[in-house]
Structures are given as structure tokens and as C-alpha cells.
Amino acid sequence: MNRKCKKLSNSNSPHDFWHLVKNILNNLTS
């Protein structure tokens, strides 16, 4: 799990960031 978080932190891809935000929004609305 730590490796996954590290990968996300190291990734500055807008697409990855938006994907993360989208998932959070989906969790909040469901």
C-alpha cells in the first residue's frame, strides 16, 4: 500500500489526479 501511495505522490499526471478526485466525488455522492 505504501508503494502505491508513493507512486501516486510521485506522479504529477493531471489525468491521474483527476481520476483520484473523480473517485472521491463518486464515493461522496453514492
Image (cartoon, rainbow, N blue to C red):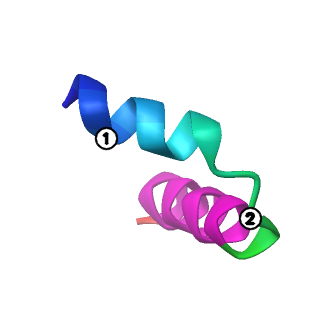
Residue tagged by mark 2?
A: 13
Question: Which residue shows up at 61% across the image and 39% down it?
Answer: 10
Q: Main secondary structure of the magenta part?
A: helix
Which residue appears farthest toward the left when viewing the image?
A: 1
Q: Position of residue 29 (x, y in %)?
A: 53, 63
In percent of width and height, residue 18 lies at 72, 68
In the image: residue 7, left or right of residue 9: left
Q: Residue at x 59, y 35 (%)?
A: 9
Quarter of the N terminus within the rendering = top left
Answer few, some or many: residues within 10 Å of disc 2's Cα (few below 14, many 20 plus, some between 14 and 19): few
Q: Is residue 6 left or right of residue 18?
A: left
Does 24 appear above or below 15? Answer: above
Q: Quadrant of the C terminus?
A: bottom left
Check if residue 20 falls in the magenta segment: yes
Residue 14 in the image: above or below residue 6: below
Out of 25 and 13, give the one closest to the viewer. 13
At numbered mark 2, what does the secondary structure look like: helix, strand or loop? loop
Residue segment shown in magenta = 16-29
Farthest bottom residue in view: 15
Q: Say what amino acid the circle numbered 2 marks.
A: Ser
| x and y, in percent, of residue 24 in the image | 53, 53
In front of the other: 12 or 17: 12
Residue 20 appears in which quarter of the rendering? bottom right
**Magenta-drawn stretch contains 28:** yes
Can you identify the residue that label 1 sits on? 4
Mark 1 Cα shell of 10 Å, populated few (<14), some (14-19), many (≥20): few
